[in-house]
Amino acid sequence: MTVEGEERLRAELSNLKSVVRPQIVEAIAEARAHGDLKENAEYHAAKDQQGFSEGRIKEIEGKLADAQVIDITKITPTGKVIFGATVTLIDVADDSKKRYRIVGEDEADISQEKISVMSPLARAIVGKSVGDAVVVQTPNGEHGYEVERVEHL
């Protein structure tokens, strides 16, 4: 995962533990004060929320424990596409340019131009150098690109 991805997960974990968890505990205590727990919808909703929140905490802690964080800015640029690099591609069909950052699966967000290292496009371009042509198999058939630029941002 990238340094940015790790920071985002740590911030979410901190929020879950220091803000969300106490709010849920308070909601459960308040719902208990209303009496009969069998027919108390507020209590059951709070317990469900607690289960979801605790599950997400465990998931994030597991991801952070297993993560290999890569700081692309500390890697000497070689012109090759690697994990964490920002790549500018030229679409050979219409000469348009597309720019993507190759990130971990949990960080991928196409609206922010971040693609998963496991995506077909990333798998096709990793290891390629500036000037290399790449053909990517998509659901709509093959699509060609040329690697124009590789940056370590």
Image (cartoon, rainbow, N blue to C red):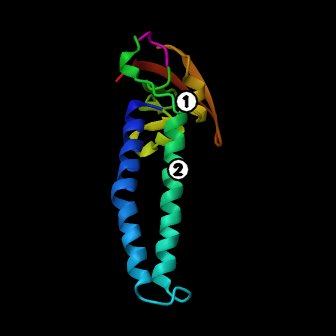
The 10 Å Cα crowd at callout 1, few under 14, some 14 to 19, many 20 or more, is many
Q: Is residue 79 magenta?
A: yes
Identify which residue, 40 or 106, lies in the foreground: 40
Q: Is there a contact, CB below 8 Å, between mark 1 and mark 2?
A: no
In terms of sequence position, does the residue under pointer 1 or pointer 2 come before the other?
Answer: 2
> Label 1, on which residue?
122
Element at label 1:
helix
Q: Which residues are magenta?
A: 77-81
Answer with left or right where residue 135 lies relative to residue 116.
right
Q: Is residue 68 magenta?
A: no
Q: Which amino acid, mark 2?
A: Lys
**Cα separation between marks 1 and 2:** 29 Å
Q: Name the image quarter holding the C terminus.
A: top left
> Label 2, on which residue?
58
Compared with residue 98, is residue 35 higher up or lower down, i.e. above or below? below
Identify which residue, 1 or 98, lies in the foreground: 1
Element at label 2:
helix
